[in-house]
Amino acid sequence: MEIILKYLDPIIRIISFITLPFLCGGIVMKIRSYAQGRVGAPVLQIFYDTLRMLRKKPVDGPFSGFFTEASPLIACLSGIVVWSLASFEWGSYLLIPFLIGIMRFALLAYSVENGTSFAGMGAAREVILYVFCEPIMILVIVVFESHLVFNASFASLAFGGLFLLGTSLVILAELAKPPFDDPRTHLELTMVHEAMLLEASGSRRAFFELAQQLKTSSLFLFVAKMGVYHGEFFLNKSIPSFWLDSVAILGALLVSVCVGYIEANSTRRKWLWIPELLGLNFIFMLFLGILLKLG
């Protein structure tokens, strides 16, 4: 029995590492469809589309060069590293903003090299989101790697709920979900990203799509682990580690359900409104983090 429990936790992590990126995106699509009164595509539709695009040969534009060929691979490899960090925790979570920055650089380099005006608009929006999101994400990770514990008291639950609200807001902005942008566009990529990927096709589009799904699942699992690692109920030393991982995986799927419902019931706001909201969220998270550390 001890041998089974010893290897059960790695097995659960490996299975979730393979399946969760496609399940998170598929659940978001399915819940959004149900909330709008539609049946929608199958949950694994993203997996089927990725396989289909991988078998197609990409068609390059007249201005394609080094970044056109290298950027999809760089973005996909960075996404795999981010997802492995979120799944296996082999390093500090402070690497997440750095790795996401590499993914953004690859995406921006691809769009700028192809040189379309529509891609320039998407690149400008992507940079704005990066500038406003990354400081908040670093604050969240610093609190995540601290030794804070939220118990069942009203004050602790209130602070934890407010912190989770601010974290959810920055993750929606990081993924360009409503109200920051509208993902109901081609191949489920957001308008921010789709504007930069109009020239992408075939296997290169598949690599960009896979990178986006890996980043999505990484952030969802990160939010779930935040609740597990800082909740007093889950910190009992007698609880086996595979139970903690199972709860975190179920939490990531629950976050996918919530995001799908938000997509179905919210609309994109004006773009000029977004920097103001993210700026206020940064100030809010800064003061809240200070209060949590002092408390």
Image: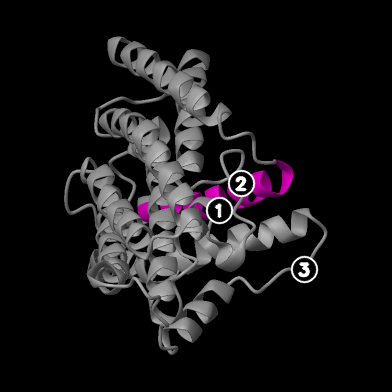
Residue in front for this viewpoint, 181 or 250? 181
Residue in front for this viewpoint, 227 or 80? 80
Residue 214's spot in the image, x, y percent?
Answer: 39, 61
Q: Quadrant of the C terminus?
A: top left
Three-letter code, disc 3: Val
Q: Residue at x 45, y 35 (%)?
A: 170
Q: CA–CA distance between discs 2 and 3?
A: 18 Å
Q: Are marks 1 and 2 in contact (CB under 8 Å)?
A: no
Q: Is residue 72 above or below residue 254?
A: below
Three-letter code, disc 1: Met
Q: Residue at x 79, y 55 (%)?
A: 36
Residue 61's spot in the image, x, y percent?
Answer: 40, 75
Q: CA–CA distance between discs 3 and 1?
A: 23 Å
Q: Is residue 230 visible?
A: no
Residue in front for this viewpoint, 271 or 287? 271
Residue that extends furthest to the front in the rendered view of this protein: 62
Residue 65 picture quarter: bottom left
* Pointer 2 residue: 258
Looking at the image, tell me whether mark 3 or mark 1 is earlier in sequence order. 3
Residue that extends furthest to the left in the rendered view of this protein: 91
Q: Is residue 268 visible?
A: yes
- The verdict on residue 145 being magenta is no
Three-letter code, disc 2: Cys
Residue 272 picture quarter: top right
* Pointer 1 residue: 191
Rate crowding at label 1 as few (under 14), some (14 to 19) or many (20 or more) other CA atoms within 10 Å: some
Q: Secondary structure at mark 1?
A: helix
- Residue 5 in the figure: left or right of residue 266: left
In the rendered structure, find residue 39 and report the number of the disc placed on it.
Answer: 3
- The verdict on residue 249 being magenta is yes
Q: Is residue 256 above or below residue 223?
A: below
Residue 30 picture quarter: bottom right
